[in-house]
Image (tube, helix red, strand yellow):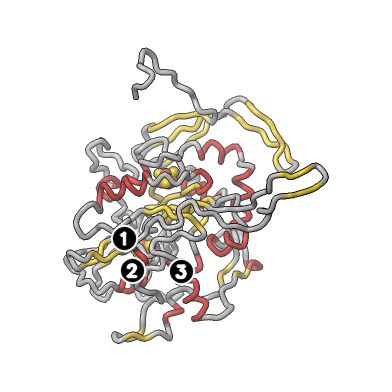
Amino acid sequence: MLYPYEEKHPQQQFAFVFNTNRCIGCQTCTMACKSTWTFSKGQEYMWWNNVETKPYGGYPQFWDVRILQMLEEANPGGQVWNLAQKDGGQKPYGVYEGVTIFEGAQKRYGPEGQQRAIGFIPGDEEWRFPNIYEDTPVRTEGLDFVWDEKGVSLPEHRTWFFHLQRLCNHCTYPACLAACPREAIYKRPEDGIVLLDQNRCRGYRKCVEACPYKKPMFRGTSRVSEKCIACYPRIEGKDPLSGGDPMETRCMAACVGKIRLQGLVKIKEDGSWAEDRYNPLYYMVKVEKVALPLYPQLGTQPNGYYIPPRTVPRPYLWQMFGPGADEAIEKYLAPSRELLAVLQLFRIAQKIIFRYEIKEGKKVFETSINGKTWSMYNDTVIGYGRDGKEIVRTTVEEPIYIRKDLHLNSI
Ligand code: SF4
Ligand code: SF4
């Protein structure tokens, strides 16, 4: 892959896993971010975290359709995966043989010379409706009433939609950074967070144009660009409630649906993830392979990973998450004993969990999934912080707490 700067990687990387199957689209994450960072004049249309309803929703509107179309125009029919080269290590899903946004730009010239990544600047209208098409399903088939000898029966609705949670992916190869002619964007060596230096920025909007996920945004009042800062004071343990420990970002910590788990993973010199078997993110992405990057074909190597929605037609998921979608859904539908325990850690604590441990419990349930026996154990999962101290402990069967002596309406 072409990238305009030499390889240099941070010691740790900010990363997250989202379970799309659990999101209720409540937008609490969106508002947690908005009320923390983008509530000022000139930021009215700026949503660093947004949750859009797929397939029609998007902020900015149709951002992904447009960039996929541009890739296709740069290399017609070539965006394919070679599955024969699949191995268990660095190529778990095969090799992508199409062009990324970086190679796709080779034949594209602007007034300032060859572009570093293909992209576009959305118009004002496209930023204006962050939750357009919210909860709007796709009509597919089966919507007609059925008449037969028994009378009329209700139709089987085979419609679908799902919520896609989005923020800056703090990419390993950030397109925003690659495109900035002022070198105003940098990746922090300590945690891989991608920041935009507003003193260096001159508002050329090359980052807005190049980021395929459309996460840098231009502020009309200051005439410079802004982007998600991964709540870095919280990651650094500077939140007043942290006691000096790294804390999850505001959007992660506020998630009502408990769909989010965010952390830091160790990075090797070549940029790959160092083995850290009991880091919950490492386990889900590298061992269990239940979580996948969003549009991996774009080439920025995003550090946000998604457990794909199980109710969505597979071709849509293959395009969005690559060829690993089938395996990820299979793993999620009948989770292993370890995965089921790790899933309990989502949004269970505000502090970042660096390591987990599982203590085995009794078998509490048995059923059959896809013709195979599946058993559930009430294991206990324990999460530890950076200093090795226990942060949280919970069981697979969620404990019920009955509060005493409270008025029914009290919280
Ligand atoms: S998601 Fe966009 S803004 Fe964020 S690091 Fe990647 S390229 Fe840059
Ligand atoms: S807070 Fe959680 S459940 Fe609610 S919209 Fe955001 S990601 Fe989804």
Residue 206 location in percent, x, y? 30, 74
Q: Residue at left 24%, top 68%?
A: 184
Q: Is disc 1 surrounded by few (<14), some (14 to 19) or many (20+) residues within 10 Å?
A: many
Q: Is disc 1 in contact with disc 2, using a CB cutoff of under 8 Å? A: yes
Q: Residue at left 83%, top 45%?
A: 149
Q: Is disc 2 in contact with disc 3, using a CB cutoff of under 8 Å? A: no
Instruction: Give the residue pinned by disc 2.
Output: 176
One can see residue 201 in this view = yes
Residue 176 location in percent, x, y? 33, 68
Numbered label attached to residue 194:
1
Q: Is residue 308 above or below residue 5?
A: above
| Residue 244 appears left or right of 152 | left
Question: Which element carries disc 3, helix, strand or loop?
Answer: loop
Kindly identify the amino acid type of the residue bearing the numbered disc 1: Val
Point out the image quarter for the C terminus. Answer: top left
| Label 2, ligand 1: CB separation under 8 Å | yes
Instruction: Give the residue pinned by disc 3.
Output: 299
| Residue 379 appears left or right of 26 | right
| Front position in the image: 372 or 312 | 312
